[in-house]
Image (cartoon, rainbow, N blue to C red):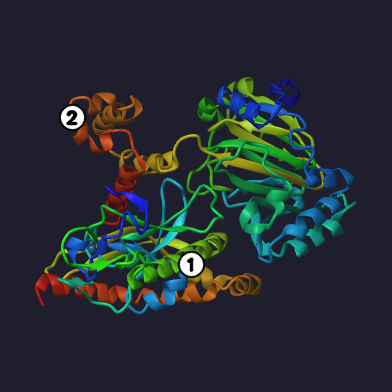
Amino acid sequence: MSQHVIVDSVSHRDLRVLDGASAALGDNVMAALATPHEFRALQAFYPIVFRRDLASGQVSALALFGFENGENLYLKGEHWDAPCKPLAHAVQPFLIGRSQDADMPGQVHIDLDHPRVTQAGERGVRLFDEDGRASPLLENAAQMLGDLDGAYRESGSFFAALERYDLLEPFTLEVPLVDGSKHTLVGFLAINEDKLRALGGGEMGDLHREGHLMPLFMAMASVSQFAGLVARRNARISGT
Amino acid sequence: MTAALLPVAEMAVADAAALDAAMANADRPFVLRGLVRDWPLVQAGLRSAREARAHLLAYAREREFKVSMGEPEAGGRLFYSEDMQMNFRMGQGRLDRIFAGFDAAEGRTVVPTVYLASIDIEQYFDGLSAANPMPLSPRDALVSIWIGTPTKIAAHNDFPDNLACCAVGKRRFTLFPPDQFRNLYLGPIDNTPAGRAVSMVDLATPDLAAYPRFAAALDTALVADLEPGDALFIPSLWYHHVEASAPFNVLINYWWRETPRFLGQPQNALNHAILAIRDLPEAQRAVWRDMFEHYVFSGGSEAAAHVPAAARGVLAPFDPQSAARMHAFLLRSFSQ
C-alpha cells in the first residue's frame, strides 16, 4: 500500500531517502511512465511504447525495462545499467500532490510506505538539515517534480494528435530466447509508420507547429532498443 | 407504404438531467423536438445551406476528409451493387473543396451522391463541438458528424446508445427492435458498406417475394421524421434505416455505452464464435451452446458459486485490472 503525505520540515525532519538501485528499493518494475518531452533522452536506452487504459480510454507512453511484470532487465544487482531514467521513476519516493483546484501549483508529497523511505539508522540522505532547511536531495526532487508536472501537462496535446491522425496501432512482439522459449509481448501500441507516411502537408504542418514531430520520431527510433532488451534477457538466461 | 408505419413517441425534457432520466427508463426510441434548435449550426442552416457550410468550414481542421461518392442513378442509396461490391467509391479531400462541389450543385436536379459519414468531430474540427454543445449531461461520448446530399442508408444497428441530432436538412429514421434481425435479412458481416451488417431489403420497394419475413419486421417498425434541431434517442442495438432528403443534410450524433468500457466488444465475441464454433459438428456445438449458457448468458453465477471468492479470477465480475489481464490473455492466445 502507499501512504502519500505532504512533505514538511517538522514531521519529516529525521526522514531519510535511500538512493542507489535495487529490487528491494522498488526498482524491479517492467516499465515507467515516459513523457514526450523525455523521449529524446530515453530512446537512446529504452524502447518507448504506448498503452491505452482500458477503463478510461486514455493513452500514455512507457519506457520498457522488461518483458513481464516485475522484470527490470536494466537492473543488475545494485546497479542500474543505463545513464538516465524516466523522471516518473527517478523521482520516487516523491510525487506531486495537488489540491482540488488543478491550476494551483503542486506540492511535494512523499510516499511514506515506499521502500526508499527510512527513519532509522544512518543510511540514506536526509530531507532536511539540522536547521530544518531543505537538503539538496529534496531541492533536486522538487525540481524534478516540477519538470515532470510540466512535461505531463504538455503530453495531452501529443497524445491527442496521435489519436487525431490515428497514428497508433497495436503490436505483438514475439521474442525467441536463447533457451528455446518464447516470450510474447502484447497489449501495447506503437506508431503506425504507414499512416504517418500517408499524412498530407496540412496534417504534417499541424504536427510540426505543435512540436509533436520530434517526440514522434524519437518514439519510432526507440523501437530499435528492443534488440538490446532481448539481448539483456538472453544474457540473464545464460547467466552472462 | 411507409405511411402506414407507426411514429416514434415524442418526449419533452426540461434539461439534460431530465433527458438522462428519460433515456435510463427507455427501452424504445423517442424523439425530442427542437432539442438543439439553439445551435448556431442549426440556425445557420435555417438561413441557408451555404451558411451552414460556412459555419462548418470555420472550424474544419486542415486535413483530408474521407468522402463516399455515388452515381446519381443509385438515388442516394449507398449499398451493394449487383455483384455485392459497393455501389459507391471512397475519396478524400479538403472540406472547402468538397463544399465547393455542393455550392456548384445547388439548383441542379441531377446530382451525384456525396456523403461524409461518421466523421469524428474532435479529430476533424477544432471548436465545432464547443460552439454546438452536447445536449446530454457530461459523459464519455463519441461525437460524429454526417454531412451529405440525399442519402439512404440500409437498416443496421450499433452497440452503443445513440442520440442523433438533425442539424441541417431532413432525416427520416425507420427503426426496428433488436429482435427483428432475422426478419431484416442481414448481409455479410465482413463486407459491409460502413462497418455493420446491413439489411439486404430495400425499404423503399421491399421485395417481399424474396424477403417474406420482412413484412413481420415492418409490423414492428417505427418512423421518426426529424427537422433541423430535432433529436432522436436510439437505444443500443435498435436497427435503423436512415434517409436524408434535403439537398444538404447534417447530422451530429453521440454514441456512448452505459457499461464499463473495459469490457470487451460483443461483436468481437460473436465473430470469434463464428470462427471457432459454427463449423464444428452439431454434437460439439450443442455442448458449446450449453457452456455459453452456463458461463455467459445465464450471468455466470452458477459457474462461480462453488469456487472460493478470492480464487474466482475471471469468473468474478470484472474490474479494470482483471479486464486488462483477460485482454492480455486473449491477445496472447490470438497471437499463437
| Quadrant in the picture for residue B216 | top right
For the point 30% across and 29% down, the residue is B289
What residue is disc 2 on? B307
Badge 1 local density, few (<14 within 10 Å), some, or many (20+)? some
Is residue A172 something one can see in this rendering? no
Q: Chain of mark 1?
A: A
Position of the C terminus of chain A by quadrant: bottom left
Q: Position of residue B156 (x, y in %)?
A: 58, 37
Q: Is residue B188 above or below residue B287?
A: below
For the point 44% across and 41% down, the residue is B267
Is A168 positioned to the left or the right of B254 in the image?
left
Query: Which one is in front, B161 or B155?
Result: B161
Q: How many marks?
A: 2
| Amino acid at pointer 1 | Ala
Q: Is residue B214 above or below residue A143?
A: above
Mark 2 or mark 1, which is nearer to you?
Answer: 1
Measure the C-alpha gap from mark 2 to mark 1.
Answer: 46 Å
Is residue B228 something one can see in this rendering? yes
Query: Which one is in front, A125 or B35?
Result: A125
Asked if marks 2 and 1 fall on the same chain, the answer is: no
Badge 1 element: helix
Q: Chain of mark 2?
A: B
Q: Position of residue B242 (x, y in %)?
A: 68, 38
| Amino acid at pointer 2 | Val
Q: Is residue B199 above or below residue B115?
A: above
What residue is disc 1 on? A151
Badge 2 local density, few (<14 within 10 Å), some, or many (20+)? few
For the point 41% across and 48% down, the residue is A54
For the point 33% across and 70% down, the residue is A137
| Quadrant in the picture for residue B283 | top left
Is A196 positioned to the left or the right of B201 in the image?
left
Query: Which one is in front, B75 or B135?
Result: B135
